[in-house]
């Protein structure tokens, strides 16, 4: 299968997934107490206002029709209006999303850069003291709730040892956020630690599996040293499944961002979502869910594309 | 000086269940320019000896004694010394070409790596040498192919790449561990030819590890026979294969199915369906594939596994279905079993067209079939006892049967396949490969089927075990009179076992007829080539056959 | 040609099998130190939470403001919280909720995931594709986001919480079980059964499911670990059980402001408890997976 055909199939699959997400969001919209009218008009709407709204919006129409109109609104970028902040949800998200992406992006890159070599090293020195120690640490870190980890980091590095600020930099634009990089350290580390724990385990398992493969024996029979084999052959083969897992880890990363942003007061989408939940700001809530889910689907798609670039067999098989 | 001398070599493995002595007191020599074949069945330790000579034993193995490769002691040697040897003085070719190469690196680069491991050569020069190597091992269009990934090559081509990697630095000793076991017989003949040529050209000594006596007769100068970790007999290939001294060697050679290559003028003419009971020709075959085609996938990527195939098996007869990989023989068997729906054509089972039959009728028709498949490990559900496995068809079709009756029937079939009755309570994991295949056979017979479909039932078994299983099968067929569709790639086995043979090639029936006639005096070129490529375990005869075969090939290309 | 391993002929000689005998699996598990420690930890914690209050009874429903915010002492081994509850007792009490909801939700998620995944894997074709797109969509929506939205709509009780958490978590096990089903349905013994006329029901009931047990058990263990962690998150975000009932996450949430002013006994015990238990379940899951030789995750 050629690259374009493979990409086309993956994109179509991704679109199907996004469609299902919109259906889920639509159902949630209608599950709200008071229905979507309440969602738009707010908590204090009177029954008369709700009735008028329902009729005007065609909410007495059958659900499938409403869904199509909902989709139509989405496609024009209309995600409703937040009633606590009185701005279009779309605009709020556009302001906040890049900051969340930057935070999670840096955490992810940092996490991978550390996790992958550590995992490989653990596999090469299996059952050694370092392996056990790293395994135990990994278990601890991915069993720790992010808010607890962040809390501990704040107490240690902000209160006991006044090295780093406990609040992330505020500000509306990305540039302002970067003016105080010290404030980013703790939030990024919180996100990265969990990621390192998870991905070092993946990489370790993948490398161990690959070390059993026949091609390793062939390379050894050709006179290559263990480090050369790891570098030239095992690394790339072990990396492929791990990259695939990256796609599935994205939602976890974003979920973690929710908690981290709230803890460190970082003005990203997570904090927006948290505040919206506190004030029952339904349009914002649902808009965020939709956008984050789409971000995840796009991320997974990119991970798959990356995988097909590394591994030429992916295109040839029926995934 | 010999290229390999082992003296009292021993290898012990530490496993979860204790220490196992895989190799004991093995002493052998390989001289330059000579091929020593190390023969044995599974568990004999032959592969372990090969790995020990390269210092490639796994971490839980300890070697004792001595193994000297071109003057350097390998047992107990330090890793850097071993690394210097591997790929330059001694090289190895492995059994499974499908997994021997790094799937993410181009083949040219993998050959170049071996070159640069031992010689100070620039990347460009190594790449050019790699292309030369590919040419040397007979890969057409080597510059293009050097940039290919392993999954884009066929099994035979991958094995050639592995050989290219092995000879890249002109080793003094080449170790080949079952180099052709995973390949089709025609490809096997080509690879053996290649190895022989390369060895002759460069005066390389070859240690050939194999279980196939035909390959030994074709290729080796000297033979050492191994049994349970020890060498029981050594000698020149003619001495060992034609005048064996040790009792085990005798048994081993006797168990090898031999292809009859020359026969008196056939008394039988074209095969006619055997007579049914009462002496009249039985018109309705038990299973009949008429003009069956099977296509997987769509459009340009469609795979035509079968194309307009006509195969019929009549009551009481055994039909052998032979062919190389990709011939469609397994697909045809699965169509007969109802596991694959044909894209075109019809399948008649016991006279009924399966397409027109109701589901309930189809189900009851199926009770007349017995199935034995290839993999002894996967053919029995490890979670069930042997008795439960065998009784499963009873549970499907004879629900009313009482527990006692069921047990009785299980005991009956266990007797029929010559297995002790107390095996019934054991778990499959406690059984050996041959025993499992016989349990499979027992399960196939429990409903007294009219048709037995066997897809490579003995291909995964040692040759002596295969002999027992085939004997049992033959006996049962004589006693019970079922028809048998026997799929195999092994022409010698089919010749012994089947009355009629169907030769398949790339989804089409090449020819079919009585085994005696078709396999000795074939009518098509393909079948002739196929037969010529099968090595026979007699070195004198095999030498002549090889010469004839090469002469034919040369005449064709000239 | 044949890619099958030649099986050595001597009966009783080591044979490569797909299923591991129970005895061998137990032996392998015992050799995994972290896993054994994990199992011991789980047993101890369960006893602590459920039997502990019998040995160390405390009042977890009435407030006693006179006793509020005391540090650890002989009377209150871990001090008291803002409304006077004994923290150690609250730890036990909260633990029963965390463990119950976590284990129940983990098991529910595994059951639903197994059903979904095995049907998708067995049926195949467009049904499989559709079912897996639904799973992909479910995975794409971060669990915490959905949970916050649901919390804005209703406040669930313990049972409701179990159901909601289970419904958010069944997606990952479904993928694992689907992969397992795909492998198993092409095993020779299943093909043989179908060829002689066996039904789909028999194939699934007698062969596929029993052979998937080890994968399911391993998946369930990891799901419980994830669920307990998720419960902590959920309660921290204010969605869990309501006061005076609590669980470890709730204790963390309630003690948050106090932590900054040095009252460490309000957050360190519940935090450590969560980490310890989730770690233990993960270690046991890891050990089980190695013992059964299961692929995946």
Image (spheres, helix red, strand yellow):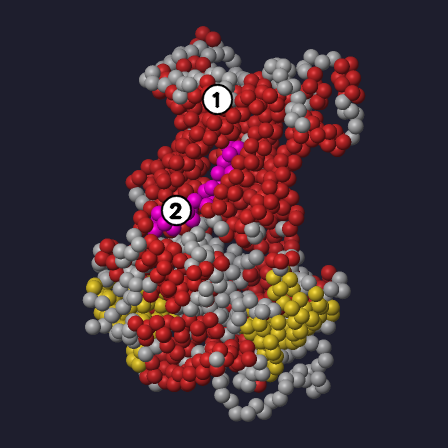
Please report the residue visible at 40 percent of the width from the left and 64 percent of the height from the top. B134
Please report the residue visible at 59 percent of the width from the left and 48 percent of the height from the top. A5
Residue C231 pos. (x, y %): 52, 28
Quarter of the image holding residue B395? Answer: bottom right
The correct choice, above or below, for C180 with respect to B66 in the image is above
Looking at the magenta stretch, what is its main secondary structure? helix
The correct choice, above or below, for A290 with respect to B124 in the image is above
Residue B432 - label: none
Q: Which residue is mark 1?
A: A174
Q: Which residue is mark 2?
A: A235
Locate residue C195 relative to residue B382 in the image: left or right.
right
The residue carrying pointer 1 sits among few (fewer than 14), some (14 to 19) or many (20 or more) residues within 10 Å by Cα, namely some
The correct choice, above or below, for C147 with respect to B487 in the image is above
Locate residue B507 relative to residue A200 in the image: left or right.
right
Locate residue C56 relative to residue B394 in the image: left or right.
left
Nearer-N-terminus badge (1/2): 1
Q: Which residues are magenta?
A: A229-252
């Amino acid at each position: 299968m050629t690259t374009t055909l493979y990409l086309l199939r993956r994109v179509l699959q991704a679109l199907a997934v996004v469609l299902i997400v919109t259906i889920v969001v639509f159902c949630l919209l209608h599950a709200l107490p008071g229905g979507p009218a309440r969602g738009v008009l707010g908590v204090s709407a009177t029954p008369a206002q709700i009735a008028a709204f329902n009729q005007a919006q065609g909410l007495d129409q059958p659900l499938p029709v409403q869904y199509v109109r909902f989709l139509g609104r989405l496609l024009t970028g209309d995600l409703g209006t937040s009633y606590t902040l009185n701005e279009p949800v779309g605009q709020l998200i556009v302001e906040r999303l890049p900051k969340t992406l930057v935070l999670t992006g840096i955490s992810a890159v940092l996490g991978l850069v550390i996790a992958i070599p550590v995992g490989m090293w653990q596999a090469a020195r299996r059952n050694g003291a370092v392996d056990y120690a790293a395994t135990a640490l990994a278990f601890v870190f991915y069993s720790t709730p992010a808010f607890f980890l962040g809390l501990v980091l704040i107490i240690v590095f902000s209160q006991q040892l006044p090295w780093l600020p406990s609040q992330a930099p505020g500000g509306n634009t990305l540039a302002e956020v970067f003016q105080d990089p010290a404030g980013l350290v703790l939030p990024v580390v919180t996100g990265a630690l969990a990621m390192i724990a998870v991905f070092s385990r993946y990489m370790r398992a993948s490398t161990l599996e690959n070390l059993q493969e026949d091609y390793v024996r062939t390379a050894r029979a050709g006179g290559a040293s263990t480090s050369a084999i790891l570098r030239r052959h095992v690394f790339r083969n072990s990396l492929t499944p791990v990259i695939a897992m990256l796609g599935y880890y994205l939602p976890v990363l974003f979920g973690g961002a929710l908690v981290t942003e709230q803890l460190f007061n970082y003005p990203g989408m997570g904090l927006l979502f948290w505040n919206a939940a506190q004030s029952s700001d339904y349009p914002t809530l649902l808009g965020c869910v939709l956008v984050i889910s789409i971000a995840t689907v796009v991320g997974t798609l990119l991970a798959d594309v990356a995988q097909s670039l590394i591994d030429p067999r992916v295109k040839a098989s029926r995934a | 000086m010999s290229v390999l001398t082992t003296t009292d070599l021993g290898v012990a493995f530490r496993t979860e269940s204790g220490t196992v002595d895989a190799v004991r007191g093995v002493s052998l020599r390989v001289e330059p320019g000579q091929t020593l074949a190390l023969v044995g069945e599974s568990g004999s330790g032959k592969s372990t000896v090969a790995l020990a000579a390269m210092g490639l034993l796994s971490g839980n193995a300890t070697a004792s004694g001595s193994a000297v490769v071109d003057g350097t002691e390998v047992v107990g040697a330090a890793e850097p010394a071993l690394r210097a040897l591997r790929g330059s003085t001694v090289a190895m070719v492995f059994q499974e070409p499908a997994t021997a190469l790094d799937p993410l690196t181009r083949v040219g680069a993998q050959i170049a790596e071996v070159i640069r491991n031992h010689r100070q050569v620039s990347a460009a020069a190594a790449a050019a040498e790699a292309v030369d190597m590919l040419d040397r091992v007979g890969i057409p269009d080597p510059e293009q192919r050097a940039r290919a990934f392993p999954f884009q090559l066929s099994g035979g081509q991958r094995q050639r790449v592995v050989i290219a990697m092995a000879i890249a630095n002109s080793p003094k000793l080449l170790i080949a561990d079952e180099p052709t076991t995973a390949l089709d017989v025609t490809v096997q003949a080509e690879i053996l030819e290649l190895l022989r040529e390369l060895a002759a050209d460069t005066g390389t000594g070859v240690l050939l590890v194999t279980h196939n006596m035909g390959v030994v007769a074709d290729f080796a100068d000297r033979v050492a026979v191994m049994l349970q970790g020890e060498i029981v007999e050594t000698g020149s290939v003619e001495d060992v294969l034609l005048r064996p001294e040790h009792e085990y060697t005798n048994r081993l050679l006797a168990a090898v199915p031999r292809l009859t290559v020359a026969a008196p003028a056939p008394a039988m003419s074209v095969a006619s369906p055997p007579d049914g009971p009462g002496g009249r020709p039985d018109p309705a075959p038990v299973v009949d594939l008429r003009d069956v085609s099977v296509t997987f996938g769509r459009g340009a990527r469609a795979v035509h596994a079968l194309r307009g195939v006509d195969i019929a098996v009549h009551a009481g007869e055994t039909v052998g279905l032979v062919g190389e990989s990709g011939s469609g023989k397994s697909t045809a068997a699965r169509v007969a079993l109802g596991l694959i729906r044909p894209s075109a054509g019809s399948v008649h089972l016991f006279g009924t067209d399966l397409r027109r039959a109701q589901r309930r009728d189809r189900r009851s028709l199926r009770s007349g079939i017995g199935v034995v498949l290839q993999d002894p490990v996967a053919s029995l559900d490890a979670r069930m006892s042997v008795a439960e496995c065998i009784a499963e068809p009873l549970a499907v079709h004879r629900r009313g049967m009482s527990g006692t009756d069921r047990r009785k029937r299980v005991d009956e079939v266990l007797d029929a396949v010559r297995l002790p009755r107390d095996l019934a309570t054991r778990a499959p994991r406690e059984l050996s490969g041959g025993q499992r295949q016989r349990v499979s056979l027992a399960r196939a017979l429990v409903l007294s089927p009219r048709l037995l479909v066997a897809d490579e039932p003995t291909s995964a078994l040692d040759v002596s075990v295969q002999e027992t299983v085939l004997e049992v099968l033959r006996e049962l067929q004589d006693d019970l009179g079922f028809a048998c569709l026997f799929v195999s790639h092994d022409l010698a086995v089919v010749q012994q076992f089947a009355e009629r043979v169907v030769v398949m090639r790339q989804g089409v029936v090449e020819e079919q007829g009585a085994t005696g006639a078709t396999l000795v005096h074939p009518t098509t070129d393909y079948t002739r080539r196929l037969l010529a490529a099968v090595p026979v375990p007699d070195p004198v005869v095999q030498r002549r056959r090889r010469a004839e075969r090469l002469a034919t090939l040369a005449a064709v290309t000239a | 040609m044949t890619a099958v391993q030649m099986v050595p002929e001597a009966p009783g000689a080591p044979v490569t099998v797909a299923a591991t005998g129970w005895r061998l699996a137990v032996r392998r598990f015992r050799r995994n130190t972290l896993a054994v420690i994990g199992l011991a930890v789980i047993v101890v914690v369960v006893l602590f939470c459920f039997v502990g209050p019998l040995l160390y009874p405390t009042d977890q429903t009435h407030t006693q403001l006179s006793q509020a915010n005391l540090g650890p002492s002989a009377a209150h081994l871990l001090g008291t919280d803002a409304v006077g509850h004994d923290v150690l007792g609250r730890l036990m009490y909260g633990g029963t909720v965390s463990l119950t909801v976590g284990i129940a939700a983990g098991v529910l998620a595994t059951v639903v995931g197994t059903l979904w995944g095995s049907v998708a894997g067995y049926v195949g074709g467009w049904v499989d594709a559709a079912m897996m797109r639904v799973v992909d969509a479910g995975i794409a929506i971060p669990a915490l986001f959905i949970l916050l939205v649901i919390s804005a709509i209703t406040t669930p009780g313990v049972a409701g919480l179990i159901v909601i958490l289970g419904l958010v978590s069944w997606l990952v096990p479904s993928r694992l079980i689907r992969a397992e089903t795909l492998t198993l349905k092409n095993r020779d013994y299943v093909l043989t059964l179908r060829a002689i006329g066996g039904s789909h029901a028999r194939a699934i009931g007698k062969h596929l499911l029993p052979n998937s047990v080890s994968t399911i058990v391993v998946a369930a263990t990891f799901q419980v670990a994830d669920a307990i962690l998720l419960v902590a998150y959920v309660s921290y975000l204010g969605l869990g059980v309501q006061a005076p009932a609590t669980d470890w996450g709730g204790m963390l949430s309630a003690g948050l402001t106090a932590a900054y002013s040095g009252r460490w006994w309000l957050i360190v015990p519940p935090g450590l408890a969560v980490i310890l238990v989730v770690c233990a379940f993960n270690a046991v899951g890891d050990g089980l997976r190695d013992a059964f030789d299961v692929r995946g995750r």
